[in-house]
Structures are given as C-alpha cells and as structure tokens.
Amino acid sequence: MTRAINILTLVVLLAVFAVLVPYTGSFGILLSTRILVFAILAMSLDILLGYTGLASMGHAAYLGIGAYLAAILASKYHFGLDWTFWLVVVFGTLLGAAAAAFFGLFAIRATGVYFIMITLALSQCVWGLAYRWNSLTGGDNGINILRRPSVGIQLSNNVTFFYLVLAFFAASLLILYVLVRSPFGRSLKGIREREVRMGILGYNVWLHKYIAFVIAGGFGGLAGVLWAHTNGIVTPEDVNITTSVDALLVVVLGGAGTLVGSLIGSAVVLVLREYLSALVPWWQYVLGAVYVLTIFYLPTGLMGISKRIRQILAKSSKESVALLPSGPLGSRGC
Amino acid sequence: MDANFWIIQIFNGVSYGALLFLVGSGLSLIFGVMRIVNLAHGSYFILGGYIAISVIATTGSWVLSVPVAALAVAILGLLMERVFLRPLGFDPLRQVLLTVGFSFIFQQAALDIWGGNNMDIAPPAVLKNSILVGGVYLPAYRIFMIALAAAIGLVLWLFLEKTRIGAAVRATVDDAQMARGIGIDTNRISMFIFALGASLAAIGGVIGGAFLGIYPGLDFEVLPVAFAVVIIGGMGSLGGAAIGALLVGIADDFGRALFPELAYFSLYAPMVVMLAVKPTGLFGRD
C-alpha cells in the first residue's frame, strides 16, 4: 500500500517537474536536463553502491566512454545526427557495458579500499586516453558537437530535448526499479549485507557482482551519450576524479539504495556547481561543506529523512523498537 | 636516439620520481598506519607550494619557506585528522567523500588567498645552473631534488627502523589491535604520522613548485599519480614508496617521450594490473 503511494507521489512529482521546467528559461531547462542525465549516471552507480555495496570511484569512465563515442561519431563521421541517433544510444549503452565487462575482470575480485583504488585506476586510464590521445579525442580541448540530432523531431530545441531526456530517465528508473526488486536484485542486497553468508548459501557472489557492474556500466554509457548531446562538448573533465566523486556524493546525498534519491542528490550538486557558481565566487565552500555535512549528518541521505521521521513517530506510538536498516553507509567493516 | 637521450630521460624520470617519493611516502604511511584514504593529499601539496610563495614574497628566503610550509600544512593535517577523520571511524567511502569535501574547501581558500594565476617558486640562484656530468649537462635543481628526496628517505628509514617510536609505527602498520594490546598509544602514533605525511606532501609542493608551477587544479593532477606510486609500491611501506616513485617517475617520463598519446594510460594501466594481481603492491604486507 505504501509502495503504491510512493510510486504515485513520484509520478505526480515528475509530472509537475515536466510541466514546470519549460517556464524556467533556457538556463533552467538546460540545467534540469543535466540534472536528469547525471541522475541516470548516479542511479547506475547506486546499483553498485546502494544495492551491492561496491563503492566505485571510477564511474565517470562510463560517462566518458558514452560521451566520447557520441562526440567522435558525430564530429568525425556525421553519424548519429539523424535517426541513427537511436543507434548511437544503443551503441553507447553497449560500449559502456562492454567496458564494464572488461574492467570488471580486474575490479570485481577486489574489496573495500582496493575496489575503490582499482576503479579509480581504471577510470584514470580512460581519462589518460581522453586527455592525451589528441588525434581521436581532441585532447584537452575536447570535441565540439555542432548540433543536436534531428530524429524526425528537432532535438536542437532545448524543451524537446529535455522531454527526451526525461523519458530516458523515467525508462531507466523503471528498468532499474524492476531489476532491484527482482530475485537478482534481492541477491545483490544479500551480498551487500553478508557477502560470506551468500557465498555459503551457494550464490555465485563474483558473478552477481560482475553482472551488476556490467549493468551499471551500460546505464553509465547511456548517460554519457545524453551528456554529450546536452552539453554540445565533451572534454577530459567529464572523465576526471571530480566527476566520479560527484557521482558518489549524489548517490550518498540522495540516499544510497533508493534509486530516486539520485535525482534529488543530482539536483542539489548540479545546482551548486552550475547555478550557485554563477552567482557567488565562493560557491566551492558550500560544495565542500555539503560533502562534509552529508557524511556526518545524513548517513542515509535526504531520502532517509522521511523514513527516520516515520520511524520516530512509529516508535513513540507503538513503543516498539524500530531499528534503522543498516544501509551501505552503516557501521560495517570491510 | 643515442645514449644521451636515454641518460637524460632516465635522469628526468628519476628526478620526477624523487618528487613523487615525497608525496607518495606520506600518503603511504598515512594509509598504512590509519587505513585512511586521503583524497586531500593533493591539497597539502599545493598548499605547501602556495605557503612557500607567500613566505618567499615576505622574507625573500627560499630556505625558510620549506620548513614553514611543512609546519603549517602539518598543523592543518593534524586538525583535519583530530576533528573530522578520527570520529568517522573506518569506512573508506566516507573517508573519500569527507577528504574530497575538504580538498574543495582548500581549493576555494587557495583561490581566495592566492588567486587563480599560475605561480612559480624561484629556487636559489645556485640551483639554477646546469652541471656537466659525464658529457651531459644536467640541471642542478633536479640533482638537488634527487639528493633531497634521498636524504629525507634515509632519515625516514632510520627513524622507522632504528628508533623506538619508529618500531611502534611499524607495529601499528602490521597490526594496530595487537599494538594497542602491548601498550602502544596508536592514537598518538596516528596523529604523528598524519602530520608527518601532510608535511612531506607540503615539502613536495615547495620543491615541485619550481618546475611544475603552482596553479588551481594541480592538486587533483598530483593526487592520482601519488596513488599510483602508493599502489605500485605497496601501502604502508617506505621502501615500496621509493621503488614505486622511481618506477612511476621513469614510466611517466618515457611514456611522454616515446608514446605521448598513451602517456597517462601507460601510467595507470600498471596500477590496474598491480591491483588485480597483487593488491598489496610490490612491498606491502597484508
């Protein structure tokens, strides 16, 4: 029952968002589009961090792979600027997944801090290629995409493009929601909570993690294709550590293991990075403070606030001891 | 490509490795003793450089700038560790996000205080010459960097191997719980090592500032390279940090000279392989 209400609330909120955004001016529309794309990236990271307990510090790699694929095809081969855009979306997703399938062979065995380090190293490899392979990636200057695709409808119109991205966001959310509620998703949660026990129960822990890693890479690649066309330019900055860490913050700030929390987290971080930075020169203090305060005061993220309040209410009315679920940020060792 | 090319490349690689040793050894010790993944380590590096610039601007003394920068950053690191990292406990993800948050705050502070221009640290005139060694002219400053890193490395090694506190540090790296059990105050050891690591990074910033320059964004350029050093050498091992720094320094230099398009790839791919094959690095212990 509460689940139905939650889903209904979400649909209504997204609908209100969809109706209001076109009235926010070109800056607001573009910012909202970016928020949605980054939220897709963060949701894919949430599959790893929130549901499987894998803190990947290299998720920008997949954003970069998808984005560079779209940009290189568009600028060098004029491919993906008409109906073939849909093919690029598919290719970007597949290439992200393929990259994750390759990276996963190295990364999945590692745990805890070593997993953080190896995902960082892998994404730095991608960054290194983006930064130095001038003939392919344009080096430091990146690649400009001169115009957005026209797929029967003109995506160069920011409002139209916003609705397309919103549709991709909703579809990704739906698919990932079904995924985490499937038996496979439940096994992932089991691995997050007690990896050894899942192994003893006969689950192939490595394979579960690997598949989650590949799926996350695929959605990361999708986000990359959309990111390239949202911004019209792809640079090595899209692949650097800061982007990866921002994605982590977005998940944790929104609430790891909630999927939709990523949208809230993405909104907060991108509004700080792009709106506040245009207003005041000292915006990085705020961004830094958000990082620090999130870690200390919001272990379950913004989505966790309502849950906490509900638990406090339930506790006072029923006198029953309601324990907070141990999220991925709970006090577990590695 | 004659012999001189190879000599100069190896020399450049070794001198870059000397700089990386200063940054990497601190990061490695901090991780080894406290299991803290410190993403603010690059900030210590550039803050060291910036503070040195201010000291040189006010007193005119380059020699004075090194200890002042080291001390100031050590105090900063100490405060960060005591007030924020200690209450956090052991959770790599939270450490990562917290220290990144701090590095953003430091970035902004540096921008407010020193501005956004690329700044240079001028070393003393003596070090600006070139010295003829075996038919090749080598810049004196790079020779000085190698000598300084070797000296610091030697002092650190003697300290870790020959003194009582050094033994306590090694015991804490190997097994913190056991160390506490036999009466070592690991709390104070951690505090000390964090300050030491931060000051080593700051010295790196002063030394490296002379040929890298000091500019916004350098912190996040230095950081992943320092991690590569630590991972390849092995976290928590001084000898590992030295070997890792040399390997990364030389690999980076040859990468730039021989296949520039793959320069950074050739740096991080070995890091991936090392993590996959032997996560504890060449010299690390479980």
Image (spheres, coloured by chain):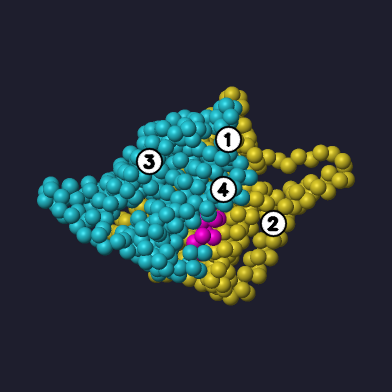
Q: Reply above or below: A78 against B161.
A: below
Majority secondary structure in the magenta region: helix
Task: Tell me if label 4 and label 1 are in contact, CB under 8 Å.
Answer: no
Same chain for the residues at labels 3 and 2, yes or no? Answer: no
Same chain for the residues at labels 1 and 2, yes or no? Answer: no
Q: Residue B155's mark?
A: 3
Residue range of the region highlighted in magenta in the rendering? B98-108
Residue annotated with mark 1: B185
Asked whether residue B218 is in view, the answer is no
Same chain for the residues at labels 1 and 3, yes or no? Answer: yes
Residue type (three-letter) at the residue carrying disc 2: Leu
Disc 1 is placed on an element classified as loop
Q: Residue at x 54, y 49 (%)?
A: B78
Measured in 3D between alpha carbons, the distance from the residue under mark 4 to the one under mark 1, in whole angstroms, is 16 Å
Q: Residue B81's mark?
A: 4
Residue type (three-letter) at the residue carrying disc 1: Asp
Task: Tell me if label 4 and label 3 are in contact, CB under 8 Å.
Answer: no
Nearest the viewer among A244 and B34 is B34
Q: Residue at x 37, y 41 (%)?
A: B155
Q: Position of residue A205 (x, y in %)?
A: 54, 31
Palette colour of chain B: cyan
Q: Position of residue A140 (x, y in %)?
A: 35, 62
Location of residue B184 by image quarter: top right
